[in-house]
Image: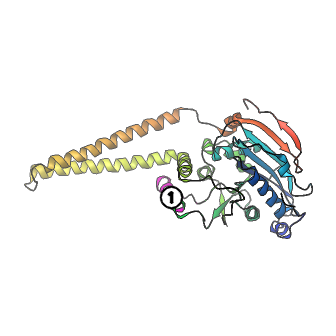
Amino acid sequence: MPAIPRSNIAGATAVSAFDQRKRIAVLTPVLDDWACLASLVGDITVQYTGSNVEFYVCAVDDGSVALFDPGIMSLPPDGCIVGIEILRLAVNLGHQRAIAVGLCALSDREDFDAVVVMDSDGEDRPVDIAALLRASAKHPGHVILARRDKRSESRAFRFWYRLYKFMFHVLTGQSLNFGNFSLLPVTVVRRLVHMPELWNNLAASIIRSRLRCTAVSTSRGSRYHGRSRMNLVALIVHGLSALSVHIDTIFVRVLLTAAAVAIASITGITAVALIRFTTNLGIPGWATTAAGDLLIILLQTVVIVVAATLTMLAGRSSRPIIPIVDSLQFVAHRERYSPAGILVEAVPPKVGS
């Protein structure tokens, strides 16, 4: 790791609006990208050492194969990083559920003012944390969302991403124009970890929670190392996870659409029968064909509605996963390090907590 300066004027003035020292937990999921994590921690140190904000980094190891080397995290003792925690999961749960486990692990801490959720690959820029902190100072208690004004992915990816946001809006009636990069006050964290929806998608859960939110414009950063794992398949899985948070709203909208289709089909069949038996306008055989097609549409609509209703009722009768109750079952180990990379504490999992 390159030498880290002891202070940074821009970073120090970026959060100088705070009258009291703040301590922020940075929560980031990691899957083998330990070099990216080291670069993220280094950037935070460069930009905020000398300010009145301290950071505690909690990295959720989402089932990595590569081993973590604490030597790459060697930081100055007088920097803004006060501690590093590696939360090791027993299996790979995926990006969103790793975040949920991390939030649950931090929810009972009393020494943080807020949690910043961000990716460790550099695409969520550490410099933008200052903007989130300033917005939080102006809007205490609000969830501060980092909204990217521009995206720099390929045209194909941007097309599918816009389609995903469009479908989300059509099916749920909500706009989803932000990702995981956000600042969550501790009180908000303690509320979110009791929401079953958090297990599937953080951003959609924030919408569902009806918490007060404030958006801050940001730009997409460049990856520190390697290539992004986000592709079309991963985007589809991510989109389905977000939609699942609003499954009841989607069900009602599908039900209303099906009712409209059924009414239109019944109206069409009635119109065909009236024309066939009360007028001489019909071409021989057309009434049977038209009525048969409309009847097929009606029967298919009824089958879809019945199947969707039974699936919805079955889901409601089963016990949901409550993150604060169930998520820590997936924690295999917790390790806490000093800024110098020295192991301070190794905590075994709390089975049954």
**Amino acid at circle 1:** Trp
Provide the residue span drawn in magenta: 158-177
Is 328 located above or below residue 281 in the figure? above
Residue highlighted by disc 1: 160
Secondary structure of the residue carrying tag 1 is: helix
> Which residue lies most toward the left here?
280
Q: Is residue 200 left or right of residue 105?
A: left
Residue 92 appears in the figure: yes
The question of residue 162 being in magenta is answered with: yes
Residue 300: percent from the left, percent from the top?
Answer: 32, 42
**Magenta region, mostly helix, strand or loop?**
helix
Residue 114 appears in the figure: no
Residue 269: percent from the left, percent from the top?
Answer: 21, 48
Quarter of the image containing the C terminus? top right
The question of residue 19 being in magenta is answered with: no
Count of marks placed on residues? 1
- Which residue is found at the position 43% from the left and 50% from the top? 253
In this view, the residue in front, 349 or 267, is: 349
- Which residue is found at the position 53% from the left and 45% from the top? 244
Is 314 located above or below residue 82 in the figure? above
- Which residue is found at the position 58% from the left and 33% from the top? 319
Residue 243: percent from the left, percent from the top?
Answer: 53, 49
Q: Mark 1: few, some, or many residues within 10 Å (few <14, many ≥20)?
A: some
